[in-house]
Amino acid sequence: MIDPPTMFTTFDSIRRWADGTALLLALSACTTASPPAMPQPSIDNTAWTLASLPGATLPAAPVPTLRFDAGRVQGSDGCNRYAGSYSADDGRLQLGPHLVSTQMACPEPAQRLSAAFNAALAQVRSYRSDGAALTLLDAAGSSLASLAAQANGLAGTAWQVGAYNNGKQAVVSLLPGTTMTLAFLPEGRVGGSAGCNSFSGSYTVAGDLLSLSRVATTRRLCGQPDGLMAQEAAFLSALETAATARRERDRLELRSATGALAATLTLVPAPKP
């Protein structure tokens, strides 16, 4: 620190002290994130997919994702799921301070990409966005990562169920060798397979809000594997509770009105022409 002199004997000494103080203030300002020069749109209720990360080569899949929703941030780092809080104001952005994540070990190069993406998130202090692209910036205004807006529509998509709420306060995986699907048709119809029987109904969606109605099933009885019919009944009951649908690239979460997880699903790629 430069302490102000207790007595100035000459004009030059005053000027030297003032110049030194100004320099310290300028250096201090460099450590504080400055918002982008132009006003930035809100990033609340937006979802993004990593498009580029300096020094990293992105795989075809899985690619890191980022979603902002009511002060909460979540996504995938390409290996593990993460979640936490965020604050954003006039282009400034702070993630965390403490993001939590799953702790699964992944093969390379997914593990390296995961580490690089998390390191970038820890340095974020501001952002730029035009609605179609999002650039994360560090305290000096340098680019840390570029992301592209995710498609978040459901119409015309098909999904495979990965886990569902069994109605006993637990989200469980499917029985080995079984498959359940869910498809959202463009005309507001929904259908799929519950493992033994097929089902169909109608749906409406507004933002994250989802409403399923008039879901009907076929009446087959399947004996194998053991527990298949109980699994089917539990999944259909969970599906009836779905009140929100949050899509994150190729992942879909259905939740009840209370926020309980009803099911997680993975996008089924459209067949190539």
Image: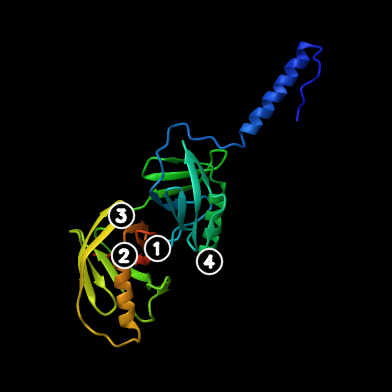
Q: CA distance from mark 1 to mark 4?
A: 33 Å
Q: In what element is the residue under mark 3?
A: strand
Q: Is residue 12 visible?
A: yes
Residue type at mark 2 is: Thr
N-terminal-most mark, 3 or 1? 3
First reached walking from the N terminus: tag 1 or tag 2: 2
Mark closer to the observer (2, 4): 2
On the image, the x and y values in percent for residue 76 come to: 46, 59
Label 2's element? Answer: helix
Could you say which disc has been placed on residue 209 in the image?
3
Q: Are marks 2 and 3 in contact (CB under 8 Å)?
A: no
Question: Do labels 1 and 2 touch, CB within 8 Å?
Answer: yes
Q: Earlier in the sequence, mark 2 or mark 3?
A: 3
- What is the CA distance from the residue labelled 3 to the residue labelled 1? 14 Å
Above or below residue 171? Residue 175 is below
- As drawn, is 164 to the left or to the right of 29? left
Vertical position of residue 243 compared to residue 218: above or below: above
**Which residue lies under the disc numbered 2?**
241
